[in-house]
Image: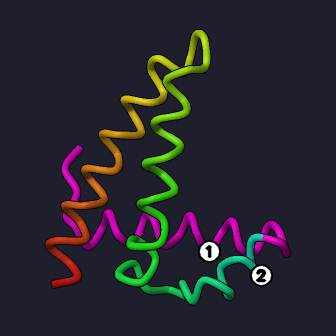
Amino acid sequence: MTITAQEGAKIILDAVAEAATQEKAAATTMAGAGAGNDFCGIWPKAKPLLEVASTVLVFIPGAGTVAGPVLTGLIKIGDQIYAETCR
C-alpha cells in the first residue's frame, strides 16, 4: 500500500480525534497540549513520548522485542511526514 505524506498525517489526526472523543481525559490532555487538529503541532509533542516508549518496550519479555523496533520504525515515518508536510 502506498500513501502520501498528507494521507499519513490524516490517518494520525483521525486516530487522535477518535481517542479524544472516546475518553474525556484524553480530550483534556490534547487541549492542554494545544494539539488540536494540526499534525505539525502534535508531532513535536508526541515524538519524545514515543521515543521513550520504544526504548522501554524493548525490555518487556516477548512482544516487547518486536514492539519497540516497530514503534521506532513508525517514529521514522512520522518524521518523514513531518518533514514533508510541516516545513
Q: Residue at x 35, y 81 (%)?
A: 40
Residue 43 position within the rendered picture, expressed as x and y whole percent measured from the top left: 40, 71
Question: Quadrant of residue 81 in the image?
Answer: bottom left
Q: Secondary structure at mark 2?
A: helix
Q: Is residue 67 left or right of residue 34?
A: left
The residue wearing badge 1 is 17
Query: Is 10 included in the stretch rendered in magenta?
Result: yes
Give the amino acid type for the residue marked by disc 1 in the picture.
Ala
The residue wearing badge 2 is 28
Question: Quadrant of residue 19 in the image?
Answer: bottom right
What crowding class fits label 1: few (fewer than 14 Cα within 10 Å), some (14-19), or many (20 or more)? some
Residue at the extreme right of the image, as rendered: 24
Instruction: Point out the stretch of residues depicted in magenta.
Output: 1-25
Query: Is 19 included in the stretch rendered in magenta?
Result: yes
Give the amino acid type for the residue marked by disc 2 in the picture.
Thr
Name the chief secondary structure element in magenta: helix
